[in-house]
Amino acid sequence: MRECLPLSATDPSRRRTGRAVRAVLSGTLAVLLGAALVAVPSPAVAAPPTCGPAGEDGLVEMPWALRRLDPASAWPLSRGDGVTVAVIDSGVSAAHPLLKGQVIEGRDFNGLEAKQGQCDMAGHGTMVAGIIAGKEGTGVPFSGIAPAARILPIRVLPDTRGTNDEALPGQIAAAIDYAVQQGADVINLSLVTLDRPELKAAVENALAKRVVLVAAAGNRQEQQQEKTGYPAAYDGVIAVAGVDEQGGHVGTSVSGAYVDVAAPGLNIVGPAPRGTGYRAEPTGGTSFAAAYVSGVAALVRAAHPGLDPHQVADRLERTADNPPDGHNAEVGYGVVNPYRAVSSLLGTRTDPPAGALPAPARSDDPLSWQRTAAIWAAAIGGLLAALLLAARPIVNRGRRRGWRPGRRTDSPITN
């Protein structure tokens, strides 16, 4: 950010008179006040920082991903109320109309500490946050999957370029720990990094604290081999692949046995960090697919707060639109289904699902003796009918012989 320095009162070049002086002073004061608002963010008195790329206005059609998932069908049951989703990414703008009031103070691990995670120079984290918890009713056909959830922004990425920076896993681990400390219910990790012990330990700690972790399975570049994505590949993390508008696996989405579920990951639209517009990502990526799944996880967490991370993952998998083979390395158990994930009753009487009715209590039935008598009467009647049918040929034969024993009298006698 460019510094704004006060002007010297003794500078000869600034000695003007009349209107010119007043214009310079008022202009300088405005610049200084503007700089103060940006440099010292305070949610009580200052507007959130505006930084990062702008988007295009005039979104007139609902993105295909929202039509495909239809999160509004689940909103009568859950909108994500009371759930905090930590977005560990490139930051999240709190100024866009879709996210105004949805983004709380967070933290920046990448050199912009004063921004509290609310500055997104890349535009990536803002799109992710909008997909998860964007408000409805803003005048455009766009909303998040869980519009009542809150976003905790945590900035660890300066841009969206892939990197093998050895410091990044430790930063992400610290970000996960921070999210847990701040009471996050769900952590979205739309990123891929190196497998390191400190990162694995942070993931295990979050799971032990009952925090749901959702991560991108990873994107394969052309002419490159697929690489296992971390933290998605760690046990307990919900690993997400991408699908296209026809429901097919996105070619750049990394495949593997660790893939759990899938969501839209191509031709994605989301809010821009600067201004009121929206940005398009035609190539998409598993980053955005993970955001859709984090939104569904927020709906489930709000509807069924007693579920632990493994139970949330199980619910997402069992209610997904499964592929014909049930599970495969490309889309896992299939595309998440918000309505079924929230509404389905899973389990048995011995292991009842959340919200299931208790087993009916036994009671004495005053008419039970009548049912018993009716059953015995039916059984005896059936037995008698069988005996009568069996006796009929015997009676006919007896009549033909005149009821005499031995051979029939009308039979010829042979010597």
Image: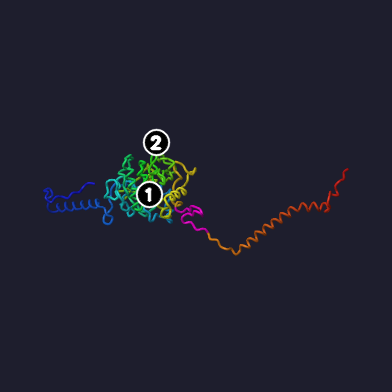
Q: Can residue 142 be seen in this view?
A: no
**What amino acid does circle 1 point to?**
Ala
Q: Disc 2 on helix, strand or loop? A: loop
| Left or right: where 9 falls relative to 126 | left
List x then y, in percent, for residue 360.
53, 59
Any magenta on residue 347?
yes
Please report the bounds of the magenta region as a residue range. 342-359
Q: Label 2 neighbourhood size at 10 Å, few (<14), some (14-19), many (20+)?
A: few
Q: Do the residues labelled 1 and 2 touch (CB within 8 Å)?
A: no
**Residue at 24% in and 46% down:** 1
List x then y, in percent, for residue 308.
42, 52
Quarter residue 198 falls in: top left
The residue closer to the viewer here, 178 or 123, is 178
Cα distance, mark 1 to mark 2? Answer: 31 Å
Q: Name the residue under label 1.
A: 206
**What amino acid does circle 2 point to?**
Gln
| Left or right: where 4 falls relative to 404 | left
Q: Is residue 372 visible?
A: yes
Q: How many labels does the image show?
A: 2
List x then y, in percent, for residue 39.
24, 51
